[in-house]
Amino acid sequence: MNQSDKSTSDANGPKSGEHSERKMVSLTPAMAAQIDDYRFANRIRTESEAIRELLDFGIQKARELGRLPEEPNQ
């Protein structure tokens, strides 16, 4: 993925005009390593940015599978 493909966040967090919300999650060592691998393979500046990008991919896939509505709750 190149920088122009990013649709929901940048290195500083959510798009301008959106507020940030912090969530704490526990990860297995394997999951943490996969996040690091993804981050470095894609030359992403921060771990937070890599996590947001992976979450975006997962949310999109859940929508494709019909597990989430197309429009997020506001």
Image: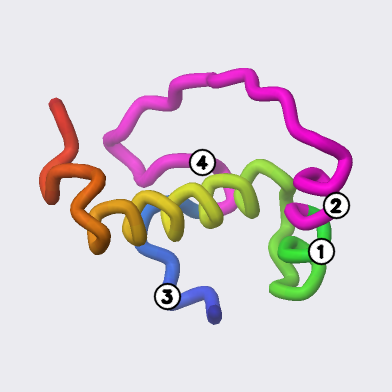
Q: In which quadrant of the rendered image does the N terminus lie?
A: bottom right
Q: How crowded is mark 2: few (under 14 residues within 10 Å), some or many (20 or more)?
A: few
Label whose residue precedes the other's in the sequence (4 or 2)? 4
Residue, x 44% and y 77% (percent of image)? 4
Tag 4: residue type? Gly
Instruction: Give the label on residue 5, or none.
Output: 3
Tag 1 secondary structure: helix
**Residue 73 picture location, percent across and down:** 15, 29
Choose between 1 and 37: the one closer to the eye. Answer: 37
Query: Which residue shows up at 35% across the image and 60% down it?
Result: 61
Q: Residue 10 location, x and y as percent?
A: 50, 54
Name the residue tied to disc 1. 37
- N-terminal of the pair, mark 2 or mark 3, is 3
User: Label 2 vs label 3: CA separation?
Assistant: 24 Å
The residue carrying mark 4 is 13
The three-letter code of the residue at mark 3 reads Asp
10 Å neighbourhood of mark 1: few (<14), some, or many (≥20)? Answer: few
Closer to the chain start, of discs 3 and 1, is: 3
Instruction: Determine the CA span between mark 3 and mark 1.
Output: 19 Å
- Spatial CA distance of label 1 from label 4 is 20 Å
> As displayed, is residue 29 above or below residue 6?
above
Give me the residue at 84% from left, 48% from top.
Answer: 30
- Residue 32 position in % (x across, y down): 80, 44
On screen, residue 64 versus residue 38, left or right, reads: left
Q: Is the magenta stretch mostly helix, strand or loop?
A: loop
The relative height of residue 3 versus residue 47 in the rendered view (above or below) is below
Q: Mark 2 points at which residue?
A: 33
Gap between marks 1 and 2 measured at Cα: 6 Å
Q: Earlier in the sequence, mark 4 or mark 3?
A: 3
The boundaries of the magenta stretch are: 11-35
